[in-house]
Amino acid sequence: MLPQALNNVIDALGMLPGVGPRTAERYAYYLFRSNPKVAGNIADTLANLHTQVKFCPVTFALIDANDDVSQLYTDPGRDKTTILVVEEPLDIYAIEQTRGYKGTYHVLGGAISPIDGVTPEQLHIQELIKRIDDDNAREVIIATNPSVEGESTALLLEKLLHEKYPELNLTRLARGLPLGVDLSYADQITLSAALENRTQL
Amino acid sequence: MLPQALNNVIDALGMLPGVGPRTAERYAYYLFRSNPKVAGNIADTLANLHTQVKFCPVTFALIDANDDVSQLYTDPGRDKTTILVVEEPLDIYAIEQTRGYKGTYHVLGGAISPIDGVTPEQLHIQELIKRIDDDNAREVIIATNPSVEGESTALLLEKLLHEKYPELNLTRLARGLPLGVDLSYADQITLSAALENRTQL
């Protein structure tokens, strides 16, 4: 029904996460109507994605292929004895935007998920242990997502690190009310956590 | 903060309609984690989008660049004396999927919108009039969107065509309750239309 070349674009864009046929059609038609440079720019940038981006072999953050190690690790202003552990590389940039953290990061590369076949062995946990040893880490901040998978991963790390490093200061991001959410709309678990972890005025 | 090549992909994908920075990041990271073929396929298909797709010069549907005129027009099984008028080419495929229409289509190329600077002169209205003359059209079905812009465009076409072709059968798509929407959730205008246009049992 549609021209083949347009269908090909729709199929290709439909591979993106959360993009269904209608959205892919909208994207494809938008690109067709736009200056060819817009589509050309997407094609050009994609050509460099896999050759010019890689994972940092120490922190597993995303880094420029020309760099050896993440600058968030090599920067001498960063406290290597504090390691904040996240699931995915993009989580780092959410934390960085708070401008309130001066330690280093460690990316697990996911969270334990039996359904998706993600086992603890597939996460960068051994590399975290190596870093705790190498950098004499004093604090590990667990910042996995507040999901079932993130909670399981946090519990596993807690157990593992508590046993192996009894002296290590092991912390987690606080639970509480997010900004702008009405008390009456907050879920029960969040509200319980906010009450339990109430702060002294 | 992020590798430049990744930022470039995020910026490029951020040009797609409705895609904000977070969504663009998610797409880019997904593509980075996926087989490079997925990104390569998007790049390859985009390269052909503008060279292999064009507008039909008669109906303004999207057609293969090798075709002269839309097959939905040239097909002898199609009744050229009935013309269904839509705003955008993709609307055609929504109607085609009903498998209940055997006339031809005409794409206006948008709807009147003073805010977006779309005037009646920019729409393919003169080409519609030429088709009504050339094909001795007997019915024109106006199928613009139920938006302020679509309604304005429908009113303009109604006025214009009624004056110019008093004999022409001018119709619009019916208003009423969509499938699966509870009566109590239907908006006032839809419900008024459903009541006014009630059908005899």
Image (cartoon, coloured by chain):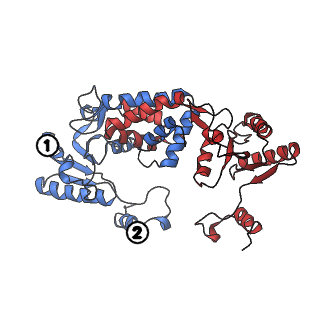
Chain colours: A red, B blue
Q: Which residue is mark 1?
A: B130
- In the image, B95 versus B13, the foreground residue is B13
Judged from this view, the residue extending furthest toward the front is A76
- Chain of the residue on which disc 2 is drawn: B
Few, some or many C-alpha atoms within 10 Å of disc 2 (few <14, some 14-19, many ≥20)? few
- Mark 1 vs mark 2, CA separation in Å: 38 Å
Judged from this view, the residue extending furthest toward the bottom is A201
Which image quadrant is residue B61 in? top left
Which image quadrant is residue B12 in? top left
Q: Amino acid at mark 1?
A: Lys
User: Residue B173: x percent and y percent?
Assistant: 32, 54
The residue under the point 85% across, 47% down is A162
Name the quadrant of the C terminus of chain A. bottom right
Q: Compare marks 1 and 2 and give the one earlier in the sequence.
A: 1
- Chain of the residue on which disc 1 is drawn: B
Disc sitting over residue B188 in the figure: 2
Q: Is residue A86 visible?
A: no
The residue under the point 62% across, 67% down is A185
User: Residue B47: x percent and y percent?
Assistant: 37, 28
- In the image, B159 versus A149, the foreground residue is A149
Left or right: B65 with respect to B21? left
Dots 1 and 2 on the same chain = yes
Q: Amino acid at mark 2?
A: Gln
Left or right: B138 with respect to A199? left
Provide the secondary structure element on which disc 2 rests: helix
